[in-house]
Every structure is written in structure tokens, then in C-alpha cells.
Amino acid sequence: MIDLYAAGTSNGTRARIALEECGLAYKLHPVALEKGEHKTPQFLAMNPNGQIPVIVDSEGPGGKPLTLSQSTAILMYCAEKSGKFLPRDPAAKPAMLQALMSASTDITPVLGTVFAILRGKDPHGPTAEMFKGRLKGLFQVWDTLLGKRKYAAGDELTIADFSLYAGYARAKGLAPETVEAMPNLERWAKEIGARPGVQRAFKF
Ligand SMILES: N[C@@H](CCC(=O)N[C@@H](CS)C(=O)NCC(=O)O)C(=O)O
């Protein structure tokens, strides 16, 4: 059994999509960020950075318990544990890793910045526009790529798609203009968002 500590942010959802889609048994422990539940001594013992998501797998490698943070590490761990959503051909792995890292480490930090600015007490308009423009630029690249391939890393559905979708869905809710008028991205998002496992992952 895996315990998941998360909230419905893009990082939290990324980890939950991983567990759902990989078909791993887990128990969700919702973490109320607004109440500081991620800064308690118990939580900091799992992740000293005081950030969600975290998983605790009672049957980790070698049958030993494992505590793991970082949404993309969790995504990769679940894929490897279940043997799902990794390219069948090892030669396709570098492209998958590139897509995965772009989705996780290009989009999510910019998204987090837009979120922090817009939810701040006195949002600075020009700064918000600059970061929204940056986010839109990243999604435009994905729109072009998805015009040439079915999924984020090629013809196969992989964890790169789940990572990208977690960011896409959050961006669409927060700043829809950053993903608008991108038909290939929309076609792809419709398919990923319709997956029952993905839909369950968003119900916090
Ligand atoms: N790189 C980490 C980032 C985790 C992260 O930023 N978590 C946010 C929520 S999305 C959080 O817990 N923020 C609270 C804080 O930093 O105090 C990941 O991918 O999991």
C-alpha cells in the first residue's frame, strides 16, 4: 500500500495521476496547504522542503519502506514499479525523458510563478503578463509538437503526457489565455483528460 500526501495543485495532481494510471493501490491523505499542514514536524520528517507531494510505499525496493518526494520522481517510480507508460523501445527513452523534463521543469515553475503573482495581495500587472507570455510560449511549442505526433514523446502514451497534462489543466483553470487557440494541444488534452484515471486524480 502506498500513502500519498498531496493537495490538488499541478504537482500534487501529477503524483496522483501516476498512482491512478499505473493502477497502484494507494490511500490519499489530503494536505491543507492554507493551514500549513505541510510544515508540521511530521510532514518535514517526510520532506524537509515542506512541500507536497510525498508518497510512502510500505513495500518499496527490496520490500523495504520508501519515502519519496518530487512529483516527477514519483511519476517515474510508479511507472517503473508497474511497468507501465514507459517506451517499449529503449531507443525511445531519451526522447521520453526530454519531453518529461520539459513538461515538469519548464512549465511547472513558470506556472507556479504566475499562480503566486495572480494570487498575491497586490499583483503587479506587467510582471504577471510577462510570465503568462512565457507560459503561453511553452504551450505554443507543445502545440506545434503535438501537430506532428500523437503524444508528448511520440506515438506512445507515456508518463510525459501525464506530467504535461497536470500543468496544462492547472494553467487552463488559472490563466486560460495561456492555452487558448492551440488546436493540437486541445486535441491531445481532450484525450488525456477523458481518461478515467486522470479524472479520478483531480477529485481532491
Ligand atoms: N519540484 C517539486 C515542487 C513541489 C511544490 O512546489 N509543491 C508545492 C505545491 S504545488 C508546495 O508544497 N508548496 C508549499 C510550499 O512550498 O510551502 C515537485 O515537483 O514535487
Image (cartoon, helix red, strand yellow):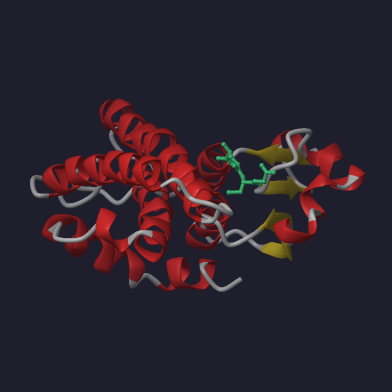
* Number of marks drawn: 0
**Spot occupied by residue 97 in the image (x, y as percentages of width and height):** 36, 31
- Res 165 visible: yes
In the rendered image, the quadrant that contains the C terminus is: bottom right
Residue at the far left in the pictured view: 148
Task: Using residue 178 as the reference point, say whether residue 147 is left or right of it.
Answer: left
The quadrant holding residue 73 is top right
Q: Is residue 191 above or below residue 10?
A: below
**Side (left or right) of 190 relative to 78:** left
Residue at x 32%, y 46% (from the top left corner): 129
Residue 186 screen position, x and y as percent: 20, 62
Lateral position of residue 96 relative to residue 11, left or right:
left
- Up the image or down, 106 lies above or below 79; here it is above
Q: Residue at x 64, y 59 (%)?
A: 7
Specify the farthest residue to the right: 41
Q: Nearer the viewer, residue 201 or 108?
A: 108
Q: Is residue 22 above or below residue 158?
A: below
Q: Return the residue nearer the eye: 66 or 124.
A: 124
Please indicate whether residue 16 sits to the left or right of residue 118 in the image. right
Q: Residue at x 60, y 58 (%)?
A: 24
**Residue 120 coordinates in the image, percent (x, y):** 56, 52
The N terminus lies in which quarter of the figure?
A: bottom right
Where is residue 10? Give x, y as percent: 50, 53
Instruction: Choose top left, top right, bottom left or bottom right for residue 106.
Output: top left
| Ligand 1 image position (quadrant) | top right
Asked whether the viewer can see residue 31, the reply is no
